[in-house]
Image: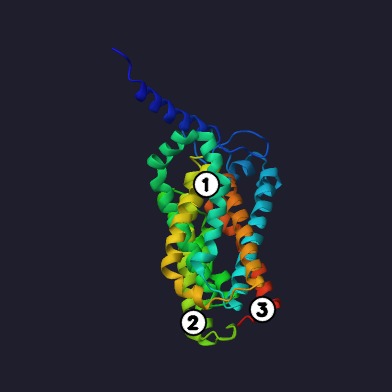
């Protein structure tokens, strides 16, 4: 009796897929040592992987507070966080510039980002897993990436839509809510525990969001030309919803990059995001195409938006590997500072005191 060769081949394909993905799953520290995923405050021992030291352990071992600030890893994460903050500020600026030109096509605007990510990372994933291994990935883990891409697409959609209703100043600041979402989900599902001072800071952020929305509703002082108070409130709510979607997707992506290779996660995000976004653009953006302004300047803004957003998507998983979704969003807070500067200097906006 001959052995079942098809079953053996299938098992070999699945094994190759698992082996290829496992090779690049564990992150590397700045010193080149394989470490467990997670921020120093949440790293844990998983199986045979040995967790990296926490911030508290580093401080105690060196007998001094804030000893972690003296490590190379801290400055790598700090610099990476600022690069990401500048990226997100740049994309927000391009969104506002497009809205000023009369071109507000939320789903279509981000579609090219997912197409570019798919073109960059999916071929490499297929090369690593081989075609049958890649098919096994789609069948076995595709549903996880479908959920991730849906959350990410909706986060982009509502955030871009917000910039057509409110100002860069308001939309940037409301993105604080993503931190609240990340912290709550991380606390419930990832069992992360935070210090009382961190919780106090989060509550202050929530209060700031309420004051910001009230400011837009009462005054209209930061409204651009042609933006009513009603539009401002709608824009603030769209930004709030987009931030919530971002927060959930950040936690999901943090979990996935701790288990899977970065090229797989970003490639799958691009692949499924392209499908979600394309369908959404065809359904909701048809009327916007007719009223949009198509000029060389608009083309330049769309190109800049796509390239910078793709860079952001390529670097964000690295941040998740080295730190956490919470630290990622906290790093982006400096983007709000740059957003305020651009709003005042470039768009001529003012802050309501």
Find disc 2 in the rendering and name its residue: 231
State the residue lying farthest toward the left: 1
Residue 202: x and y in percent read: 52, 63
| Residue 182 sits above or below residue 123 on the image | below
Residue 222 lies left or right of residue 139; in this view the side is: right
Residue 184 at least partly seen: no
- Sequence order check, earlier mark of 1 and 2: 2
Question: Dot 2: what SS?
Answer: helix
Separation (CA) of disc 1 from disc 2 = 36 Å
- Sequence order check, earlier mark of 2 and 3: 2
Is disc 2 surrounded by few (<14), some (14 to 19) or many (20+) residues within 10 Å? some
Is disc 1 surrounded by few (<14), some (14 to 19) or many (20+) residues within 10 Å? many
Find disc 1 in the rendering and name its residue: 267
Q: Which mark is residue 347?
A: 3
Residue 343 lies left or right of residue 180; in this view the side is: right
Residue 234: x and y in percent read: 46, 78
Closest to the camera, between mark 1 and mark 2, is 1
Q: At x 68% / y 73%, what residue is drawn?
A: 342
Separation (CA) of disc 2 from disc 3 = 18 Å
């Amino acid at each position: 009796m001959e052995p079942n060769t098809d079953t053996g081949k299938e098992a070999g394909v699945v094994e190759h897929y698992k082996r290829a993905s496992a090779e690049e799953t564990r992150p590397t520290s700045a010193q080149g040592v394989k470490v467990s995923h997670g921020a120093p405050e949440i790293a844990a021992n998983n199986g045979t992987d040995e967790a990296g030291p926490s911030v508290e352990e580093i401080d105690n071992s060196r007998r001094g507070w804030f000893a972690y600030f003296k490590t190379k890893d801290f400055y790598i994460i700090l610099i990476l966080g600022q690069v990401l903050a500048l990226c997100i500020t740049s994309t927000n600026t391009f969104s506002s510039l497009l809205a000023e030109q009369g071109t507000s096509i939320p789903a279509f605007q981000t579609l090219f980002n997912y197409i570019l990510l798919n073109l960059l990372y999916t071929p490499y994933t297929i090369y690593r897993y081989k075609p049958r291994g890649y098919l096994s990935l789609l069948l076995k883990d595709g549903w996880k990436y479908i959920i991730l891409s849906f959350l990410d697409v909706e986060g982009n959609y509502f955030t871009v839509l917000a910039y057509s209703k409110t100002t860069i100043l308001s939309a940037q600041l409301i993105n604080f809510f993503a931190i609240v979402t990340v912290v709550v989900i991380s606390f419930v599902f990832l069992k992360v525990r935070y210090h009382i001072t961190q919780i106090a800071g989060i509550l202050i952020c929530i209060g700031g969001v309420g004051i910001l929305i009230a400011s837009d509703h009462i005054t209209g002082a930061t409204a651009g030309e042609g933006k009513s108070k009603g539009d401002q409130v709608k824009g603030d709510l769209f930004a709030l919803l987009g931030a919530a979607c971002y927060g959930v997707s950040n936690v999901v992506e943090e979990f996935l990059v701790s288990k899977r290779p970065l090229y797989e996660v970003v490639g799958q995000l691009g692949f499924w995001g392209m499908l979600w976004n394309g369908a959404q653009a065809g359904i909701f953006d048809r009327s916007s195409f007719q009223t949009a302004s198509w000029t060389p300047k608009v083309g330049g803004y769309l190109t800049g938006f796509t390239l910078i957003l793709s860079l952001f998507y390529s670097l964000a998983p690295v941040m998740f590997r080295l730190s956490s979704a919470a630290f990622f969003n906290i790093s982006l807070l400096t983007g709000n500072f740059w957003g305020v500067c651009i709003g005042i200097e470039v768009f001529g906006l003012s802050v309501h005191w």
